[in-house]
Amino acid sequence: MAATLLDELLRDAQPIWEAMTEHPFLRELATGQLPRERFDFWVQQDYLFVQAGIRFLALLIARAPDEELRRGLLDAAVAFRNELAIFEDYARAHNLTLVVEPTPVCLGYASYLLATAATGSLAEALTVLWGAEKAYYDAWSSVRNTLGLAEPYARWIENWTSPQFAAWVDWLGQQLLRRVTESERPVIRAAFFATARYEYLFWDMVYTRAGWPV
Ligand code: MP5
């Protein structure tokens, strides 16, 4: 498989990617204009998403055929677990409850992750994971370019733009490249597009605070 598959996916999904990294939520966050209620809504929903991410990784660890992939994913699960503390510290400091129901988009995206890990091919599940992590790396890097490491967002910005996080996203991409077969390309492409669209939808959902209509 050509080493350009990742570039190809990013190039073909570029309009979605751009809409995602330039979403008003991120732009307003980067310029200090995002209302606190909208940020708090993201904190509550993303906290649920990261928890689903740990279950997703657990399923993938069980399915990983070799020790290198298992250990890399296990380290990621520990990083996800430590990340939950950032949400909990913020919630405590701002008197924000983290006991909320997932919105349709949060539940849909989390369910998509778990369904892929349970029933998709390994390469398909790695595509979704790489796509989600790359999306956060790019989204928060664009915030960092404008804002630097400013409070109250510094820990989050640092978390998703650190050299360690960049290395993890690259490692994941390499794992995917190593395991994907030519015949899987259409499935990989569909999974990447669905992930990119869910990433866009997630920012949009927290920006508009879109919950259940009934
Ligand atoms: C991530 C996230 C990154 N926290 N939320 C969404 C909607 N997409 C991607 O995953 P992680 O576990 O925080 O690195």
Image: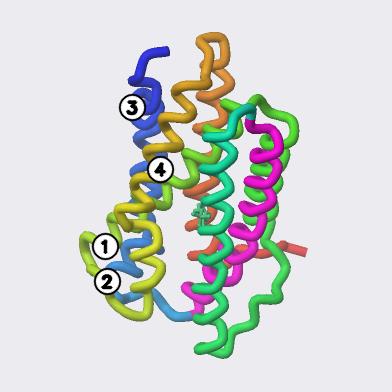
Q: Is residue 114 above or below residue 68?
A: below
The crowding category of the residue bearing disc 3, from other C-alpha atoms within 10 Å (few below 14, some 14 to 19, many at least 20), is: few
According to the picture, the residue beneath numbered tag 1 turns out to be 144
Task: Name the spot of residue 36 as percent of width and height, x first.
Answer: 45, 80
Q: What residue type is labelled 3?
A: Asp
Which comes sooner in the sequence, label 2 or label 4?
Answer: 2
Q: Name the residue rendered at 37%, 14% in the picture.
A: 2
Residue plotted at (35% across, 69% down): 29
Extreme front residue here? 67
User: In the image, which disc is placed on residue 161?
Assistant: none
Mark 4 is surrounded, within 10 Å at the Cα level, by few (under 14), some (14 to 19) or many (20 or more) other residues, namely many
SS state under label 1: helix
Highlighted magenta segment, given as a residue range = 37-64
Q: Can residue 208 be seen in this view?
A: no
Which three-letter amino acid code belongs to the residue tagged 1? Arg
**What residue would you read off at disc 3?**
7
